[in-house]
Amino acid sequence: MTGSPVRKFTDKTLIVASHNSGKVREIGELLGPFGLEVVSAGDLGLPEPDETGDTFIANAELKALAAALAAGKPALADDSGFCVSALNGDPGIYSARWAGPSKDFSVAMGKVWAAVEASGSTDRRAWFTCALTLAWPDGHVETVEGHVQGTAVWPPRGDHGFGYDPMFVPEGHDRTFGEVDSAWKHSVSHRAEAFRQLVERCFDGGPGS
């Protein structure tokens, strides 16, 4: 809640408000050192709320609150997306929708590259954004946002990661997120950056603990 004191997370179980197995896996790996029981919204059979927000933060808060209220426990939601400069930041918050109802990101990556070429722009700058919201059943939320800058490339490379990872090379590196292992990705990714901020704010070991 805006204006409320920062709240520390003290529970032993955390709901991950996602039905995306790739996101759940990455968040579970990032939470590993805290010894928490991580349960996904999919495991609990919780419905996926409509993402009606117009920003990553708005959608993360919407999803986290819905899961926390339904489960009666704190919930963590991620809203993230791939943003391309030549497309004025698209697909952005609609990144999953570009994959269609089957969530086929090979199709989504093809659509993005076709749109980039159709734009006539030679700008290949791209970035990932991740908003993370930790919500409690009483409506309190803590939200952070992380980014990683880089370049969109074609054709996609690598079969690690998920989503748009195979067409994104982070700044200062020469391999895509699809070509690196999860440990390396966790050291530079948008999700890892957001998670570092959240840990500092809300978990033991952060300021105010």
Image: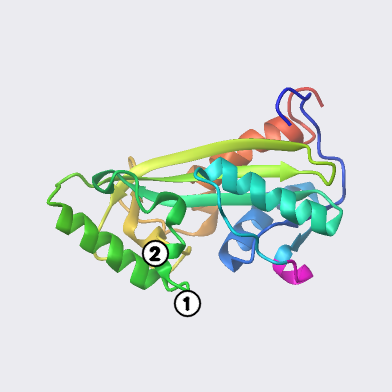
What mark, if any, has residue 124 been given in the picture?
none
Residue at 22% across, 63% down: 114
Q: Are marks 1 and 2 in contact (CB under 8 Å)?
A: no
Give how far across and how far down residue 193 sits, in percent. 55, 39
Give how far across and how far down residue 14 sits, in percent. 79, 53
Residue at 14% across, 47% down: 122
In the drawing, does residue 146 fall left or right of residue 199?
left
Give how far across and how far down residue 205 sits, in percent. 77, 31
Residue at 72% across, 43% down: 134
Q: Does the magenta stretch include residue 122?
A: no
* 163 shown above or below 92: below
Tag 1, which secondary structure?
Answer: loop
Tag 2, which secondary structure?
Answer: helix
Judged by its main secondary structure, the magenta piece is helix
Q: In which quarter of the image is residue 51?
A: bottom right
Question: Magenta segment range?
Answer: 42-46
Q: Residue furthest bottom?
A: 102
Q: How far apart are marks 1 and 2 (CA)?
A: 10 Å
Give how far across and how far down residue 57 sits, in percent. 57, 41
What mark, if any, has residue 98 been given in the picture?
2
Give amino acid for label 2: Trp
In the drawing, does residue 31 fall left or right of residue 145?
right
Q: Is residue 45 magenta?
A: yes
In the drawing, does residue 186 fall left or right of residue 150?
right
Q: By what rule are the colours in the image chosen?
A: rainbow
Give amino acid for label 1: Ser
Residue at 34% across, 41% down: 171
What mark, if any, has residue 102 been given in the picture?
1
Q: Quadrant of the C terminus?
A: top right
